[in-house]
Image (tube, helix red, strand yellow):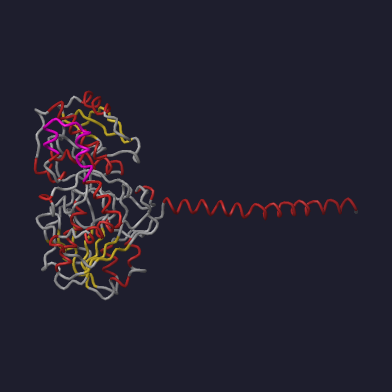
Amino acid sequence: MKAMNIQSEEPLRLMSIILCSALIFLPRFALCLGDSQSKRAVSGHVQVGADRLFSEYSHLIRGKRLALVSNHSGRLSDGSHIVDALFRYRGAHLKVLFGMEFNIRTNDYSIQRDKEKDIDKETGLVKYSLYGEIHKPTPEMLKGIDLIVFDIQEVGTRFYEHVNILGFVMEAAAENNIEVVVLDRPNPMTGLKQDGFVPDDEFLYRFGSFGKIPVLHGMTMGELACFYNGEKMLHGGVTATLHVVEMKGWKRSMWYDETGLDWRKPSPNLLSLNSVVAYTGTCLFEGLNISEGRGTDKPFEYIGAPWIDHHKAAEMLNRLKLRGVIFEPVEFTPVRKPHLGRDPELSGQLCRGIFVNITDRNLVEPYRAGIALVWAFHQLHADKMVWDETVIERLTATTRFMKMIRDGKRPGEIFASWSDELGRFKERSKKYMLYN
């Protein structure tokens, strides 16, 4: 009997030890688990403005007649398009749509581009394009509208059309006593990169340089809207009645792939986040007779032409020791891809060029990399380069760039030329930052 008692007590004693140990370590385990979840919340699960509009901010649209400015990127977390969400919402009345170059629901070049005026088949609403001759909605287009909802994913660069359309839309709203709601989304390249030329006065209020902001502005759409208003950037000094529906969970140090949000190509040739970063600088080649990699698997990361001495160019560029990037010789042949509406530059021709290999995205200064590429090619092949000056001036918003390249200025001298104006912008923009 005694032996039996010992055997029956031993498991109880072991269970007691295990239970006590668990009680000691459980709080530590819970604390570690909490820290892990907290870290994941910081590095992801960003809630964009569109997802907050129909709950916390529904009072902004309730009972109002709405216009919507959006494109394919205007999605809620459940995948539904902001057009459909507003159209179904019984508390407001969506009346008219404004899109960009493509159909408001897609960014595919192969689909027929928007006409100035069209009908959205899913809702039957009239849709205007702000990409062609008209960038600013007219009073006739806005007749009977109380409020404009603006929801577009930006890429972080001044010459990308959306930040300019934002200015034109705010200006139209101010002139017609219409409120504006900007549904905020992340700057995909973080909110820390600010660099490049600030537009000369003669280039202001244009498509590519609406306001006094540098090529890399380091702001979100909501912050830019506040900047336009607060700094009296709208033409004539008018100000719009503005509401920004802020994001939750976004930090300035976040890259888009750290937000937890689905990646949707901002435009057909911006295939990845790397191509967005490279595009900031290599978009300059849209104004030259050199392929910017459209029609390859690395658009804006591959830059070249059949006549370029790519090995010599890579050697020159790498001697500059620009941060976070290596310039590698590459050969590529652009071809027409299914999503393209026409043959790309130098289609079917073997191009010798440079692969802009971004090795550290936090350190890289992509606009400087693009400037350096133009400089190297001009040093080697000035006689073969053909400039579309109108396009170059739209992208740089200054006449200084072409003059300095043609005068033989080195990249460091070109970078220094925008130092003062960039410093002034950085100081002015600080008070409009909505996120840490």
Quadrant assignment for the C terminus = bottom left
Q: Residue at x 22, y 73 (%)?
A: 65
Q: Quadrant of residue 90?
A: bottom left
Residue 107 in the image: x percent, y percent?
Answer: 22, 51
Residue 393 in the image: x percent, y percent?
Answer: 12, 44
Q: Main secondary structure of the magenta part?
A: helix
Please name whichever residue, 100 or 108, is drawn nearer the observer in this view of the structure. Answer: 100
Q: Quadrant of residue 382?
A: top left
Residue 414 among magenta residues: yes
Please state the extent of the stretch shown in magenta in the rendering: 401-420
284 sits to left or right of 358: left
Q: Is residue 295 visible?
A: no
Q: Is residue 39 visible?
A: yes
Residue 421 in the image: x percent, y percent?
Answer: 21, 46
Please name whichever residue, 185 or 364, is drawn nearer the observer in this view of the structure. Answer: 364
Measured along the vertical axis of the image, is residue 412 above or below residue 247? Answer: above
227 sits to left or right of 142: right
Quadrant assignment for the N terminus = bottom right
